[in-house]
Image (cartoon, rainbow, N blue to C red):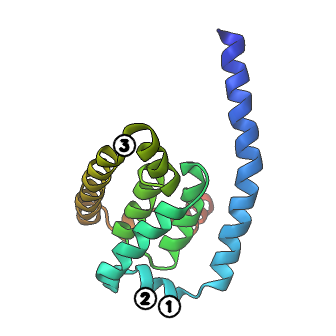
Amino acid sequence: MAVESLRNSSYYIKEMLLIMPVVFVLTALLDVWVPKEKILQLLGKDAGTKGVFLSFVIGSISAGPIYAAFPMCVMLHNKGASIRNIVIILSSWAVIKVPMLINEVKYLGPKFMTVRWMLTVIAILIFSWITSKIIKDDDIPTGEDSLELEETK
């Protein structure tokens, strides 16, 4: 059992080592190429329904494991994306990806997929709204916060 655990762990570590450099490069490129004003316009607090819809699209068509979404979401938040839209991106990345929906239709049928998708979208909307009311932008640490902590030590 221990040997099998080590095999599984090494598999996932190798996977992360292959995926994360690509994710960091793509995130850095997005950070440079997409201006802050565009992020504020499309995903900021004032983006409204357009921002919610775009957040669902970004999360649903994304590829890769959920841990690949975190660096991108940090960059989006630093550029002005709202907490609500970040929660929607992360949630839809985790549970309503297009390939997952195709598999659900194939194995569980279109009725199941449709009901599960609708309930999931409703839950994401509710929980993203609640999260945005509880967590404020100042509650999320930025890279600058960690630098300040090190300077005070």
Task: State whether residue 100 is above or below residue 43.
Answer: above
Towards the viewer: 149 or 137: 137
Is residue 100 visible to us here? yes
Among the two numbered marks 1 and 3 on one chain, the one whose residue lies closer to the N terminus: 1
Q: Residues within 10 Å of mark 2 (few under 14, many from 20)?
A: some
Which residue does the image show at 60% across and 84% down from the upper left? 34
Measured as percent of width and height from the top left, residue 18 is found at: 77, 48
Q: Quadrant of residue 13?
A: top right
- Residue type, label 1: Glu
Circles 2 and 1: CB atoms closer than 8 Å: yes
Is residue 153 visible to us here? no
Task: State whether residue 100 is above or below residue 85.
Answer: above
Mark 3–mark 2 distance (CA, rounded to whole Å): 38 Å
Q: Which residue is mark 2?
A: 41
- Residue type, label 3: Gly
Q: Residues within 10 Å of mark 3 (few under 14, many from 20)?
A: few
Measured as percent of width and height from the top left, residue 106 is found at: 46, 43
Q: Which residue is mark 3?
A: 109
Tell me the number on the disc at residue 37: 1
Measured as percent of width and height from the top left, residue 57 is found at: 45, 69
Towards the viewer: 143 or 110: 110
Mark 2–mark 1 distance (CA, rounded to whole Å): 6 Å
